[in-house]
């Protein structure tokens, strides 16, 4: 869909405009940021609809979470801040918008430009097959470009489909989130680079291990009575739980190296808590 491919780049320009206008015309800057977050929310809606059509309910749920977050940021930026402490809250919103800009610049070219996305997918699929052949005792696989992994067993290939590596299998979503978080905060460049090294390369390497595990489980039927059942358990349950736990560990490492990143997260939740408390108090007193 052409509209879906264009929306991310519209959001990038709006976020950039918001940050550029912040000091010279804060109202226009806030308006540009609010519009940018609205565009991101619309993009998330379109992507979630695609995932639902493919019965990918977990990925659709993630998109709905980002949709709600984007709409929240859009409302907060569009709403005039007239009370005490507004400057601090506004600064926080613009720092999160800066993080979103960095994340979008790193992610959307791969998701919306086929040449870049296919190159990343091919590299990940190739590394997965090469490493699996090196470390496995009996699992033989080969790659048919750009992204189909087949078993070396001819009998298996006659009965079952290959595994296709797609963009989410590259861990690009998790990687760009950490890139945005690390480089959006105010901190010395040396510590930012350290936080980058303990997150981005580690996530990519762990994702290769995840891919190898899922491929081996499918071809060797480690779980369940059929390759499809084994794939569901390995990919839909074990790998997802493992990925979440790994991200928690990586996030902890980033926060240790770069406490400013944790400060940003804590500040945002304190800000939301203050807004909820103020809203609740007004309703009670009103």
Image (spheres, grey):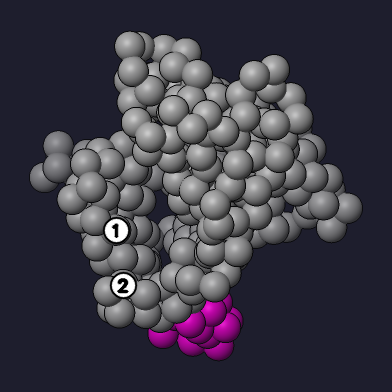
| Residue 246: x %, y % from top left | 60, 27
Compute the Cα span from label 2 to label 1: 8 Å
The residue range painted magenta reads 13-29
Return the residue at label 1: 47
Q: Nearer the viewer, residue 245 or 226?
A: 226
Q: Is residue 93 left or right of residue 122?
A: left
Residue 198's place in the image compared with 85, above or below, is above
Residue at image location 55% in from the left, 57% down from the top: 145
Residue 33's place in the image compared with 50, above or below, is below
Residue 226 within the segment the image draws in magenta: no
Tags 2 and 1 touching, CB below 8 Å: yes
Secondary structure under the numbered disc 1 in the rendered image: helix
Return the residue at label 2: 4
Q: Which mark is residue 232?
A: none
Figure quadrant of residue 78: bottom left
Residue at the outermost left position: 286
Mark 2 surroundings: few (<14), some (14-19) or many (≥20) residues within 10 A: some
Does label 2 or label 1 sit earlier along the sequence? 2
Residue at image location 31% in from the left, 37% down from the top: 58
Residue 20 within the segment the image draws in magenta: yes
Residue at image location 24% in from the left, 62% down from the top: 46
């Amino acid at each position: 869909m052409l509209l879906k491919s264009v929306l991310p780049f519209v959001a990038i320009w709006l976020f950039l405009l918001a940050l550029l206008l912040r000091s010279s015309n804060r109202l226009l800057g806030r308006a540009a940021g609010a519009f940018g977050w609205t565009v991101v929310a619309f993009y998330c809606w379109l992507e979630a609809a695609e995932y639902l059509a493919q019965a990918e309910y977990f990925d659709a749920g993630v998109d709905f979470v980002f949709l709600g977050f984007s709409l929240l940021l859009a409302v907060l930026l569009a709403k005039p801040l007239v009370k005490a402490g507004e400057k601090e809250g506004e600064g926080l919103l613009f720092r999160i918008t800066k993080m979103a800009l960095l994340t979008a610049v790193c992610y959307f070219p791969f998701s919306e430009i086929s040449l870049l996305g296919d190159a990343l997918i091919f590299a990940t699929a190739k590394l997965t097959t090469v490493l699996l052949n090196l470390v496995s005792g009996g699992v033989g696989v080969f790659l048919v470009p750009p992204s189909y992994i087949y078993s070396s067993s001819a009998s298996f290939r006659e009965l079952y489909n290959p595994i296709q590596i797609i963009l989410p299998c590259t861990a690009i979503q998790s990687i760009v989130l950490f890139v945005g978080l690390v480089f959006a905060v105010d901190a010395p460049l040396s510590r930012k680079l350290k936080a980058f090294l303990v997150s981005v390369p580690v996530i990519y390497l762990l994702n290769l291990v995840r891919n190898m595990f899922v491929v081996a489980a499918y071809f060797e039927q480690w779980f369940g009575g059929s390759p499809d059942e084994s794939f569901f358990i390995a990919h839909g349950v074990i790998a997802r739980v493992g990925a979440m736990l790994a991200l928690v560990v990586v996030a902890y490492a980033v926060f240790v190296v770069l406490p400013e990143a944790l400060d940003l997260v804590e500040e945002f939740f304190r800000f939301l808590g203050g807004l909820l408390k103020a809203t609740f108090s007004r309703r009670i007193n009103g």
